Image: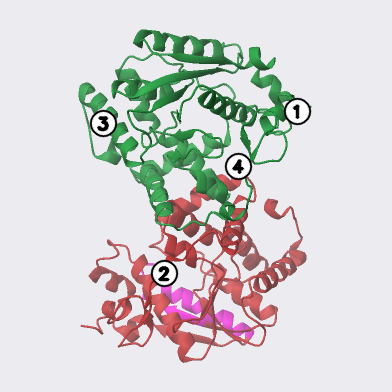
Chain colours: A red, B green
Amino acid sequence: MKQHRLAYCKEHYIEWVIDYTVKTIERYHLFSKEEKILVAVSGGKDSLALWDILWQAGYQADGLYIGLGIDDGIHYSDRSHELSLKFAEERGLLLHTVNIPERYDETIPQMAQRDRRGHGKPCSVCGLVKRHEMNRIAVEKGYPVLATGHNLDDEVAVLLGNTLSWSMDMLIRQAPLLPAENGFARKVKPLCRFTERETAAYTILKNIEYIFDECPYAVGSKSASFKQILNQLEEEMPGKKLKFYTDFLRMKKDGYLNDKNDEKPGYYHTCPICNQPTTIEGPCAFCRLVGKAI
Amino acid sequence: MKQHRLAYCKEHYIEWVIDYTVKTIERYHLFSKEEKILVAVSGGKDSLALWDILWQAGYQADGLYIGLGIDDGIHYSDRSHELSLKFAEERGLLLHTVNIPERYDETIPQMAQRDRRGHGKPCSVCGLVKRHEMNRIAVEKGYPVLATGHNLDDEVAVLLGNTLSWSMDMLIRQAPLLPAENGFARKVKPLCRFTERETAAYTILKNIEYIFDECPYAVGSKSASFKQILNQLEEEMPGKKLKFYTDFLRMKKDGYLNDKNDEKPGYYHTCPICNQPTTIEGPCAFCRLVGKAI
């Protein structure tokens, strides 16, 4: 690991990953051992690695699997559910499951077809549904903390995209911790300082079975092209990704960015249908999407 | 020109370039027709295009050529001086010349060899010397405005570099206009909204002879690798470079960035040797470099 100037054997690598995650949790004050954490589990390497690490490190972490109904010939959703269940059973951990097509009568690709946002791609609809359902379950089941497996590559790709378009509201909110407020559970990203390669190495060394395929809809996305650019930069300047991200956090902590939404009163409203927070008045984007608002 | 959704013949292209430069000058309040402008001329396409455009558009623009003593087998400095002189003579324009090796007894590469900053590359020393000398001549000869030929590719490469390292002091100061203050002449970049290709097309269509070679020391610089990344992005999203730059300027205008130096009293000092402004106390970096301070 050039960026850390470290090289480990299997045992010490696993130990280092767990220690470094705990350091991230402590550095950014993500949560304590007394709090119940809901881990959003997709069946992929990052979310299973996160759940495994939190369990190893002695945190109270349950899982949440959201079935999206993505088939595409490879039974993407079915397989990722099976792997998530198997992981939980092997460790005696509790996995909650929400099945979107059962609960809302449509799969994500079907919802996306009706929606103008996606331009044929279901990614924005999928994000909306997942964010809504994760927060709903966390609040309903009394988890103060919602943890996702976003890694450094995910974070810097989003950061680069938001920077290239100077989306200041997004930049102001991008962080390892978003505090609970206005009906949102606290959101945390304990793996935000690990590269994709590092979390993959962890799952492989720990023999964790995960769904290897990317979501079939993720191919060719903008974030994939940002990831490629960042990999080029990392090649030329080892450690650049981590530095880009941590310097960004330090810059914000030092107070260089002004949150203009602080000035807008009533930025958040409560959706009259699902009671969740929303930035629009009347039914939220999710309730409009699933047709409850019509 | 995909980003503008425009395509022109020769005559109308030249006209468009001049009009669009005037629009940039007016939009960012760079200078008026009543003010004397000193154009920093390197003999390259951008600075000669800038001088030609300002002359065509009826601005009072004189030139300043700084001889750096860069030879490297291709007589880089001699040839660029000749081309700049020829350009000025053909148009009856006034060109000031400063010869660094004659005035300070050393060429830029020689100064760089003595300096720790450069790590063998003379680029940072060259920038320091040029900034110092441009400002010295502007102030001494009574030009309120100093214009450089920086194009959009230059600006976005610097912007990307400063963003990737979150160099907030640099981001806060990057703009088409830096106002005159603390002993600095006003600095302006009227070509900041043209790509390299657009200024090159202008010089070719106007038969302006310019030094085609890049500075031999610029090859393989960090900014070259940022330019390559930005060209990739432009390929995928035509207009992205211009939007990255103009959105950045709008974001700053909207007050999203905090200038922390505003809080530091006495940020600028006056160099006791050359009387020019400096951010360090005692002799400025330039006077230390050329040995006057020793």
Residue B147 makes an appearance in the image? no
Q: Label for residue B293? A: 1
Secondary structure category for the residue under label 3: helix
Q: CA distance from mark 3 to mark 4?
A: 40 Å
Q: Quadrant of residue B75?
A: top right
Q: CA distance from mark 3 to mark 2?
A: 38 Å
Q: Is residue A200 above or below residue B223?
A: below
Secondary structure category for the residue under label 1: loop
Q: Which amino acid, mark 3?
A: Asp
Q: CA distance from mark 4 to mark 1?
A: 37 Å
Residue placed under numbered mark 4 in the picture:
A236
Q: CA distance from mark 1 to mark 3?
A: 47 Å
Of residues A211 and B159, the one nearer the viewer is B159
Q: Which amino acid, mark 1?
A: Ala
Q: Residues within 10 Å of mark 3 (few under 14, many from 20)?
A: some
Considering every residue shown, the one lying at the far bottom of the view is A141
N-terminal-most mark, 1 or 3: 3
Say whether residue B215 is magenta: no
Mark nearest the camera among 1 and 3 is 1
Q: Are marks 1 and 3 on the same chain?
A: yes
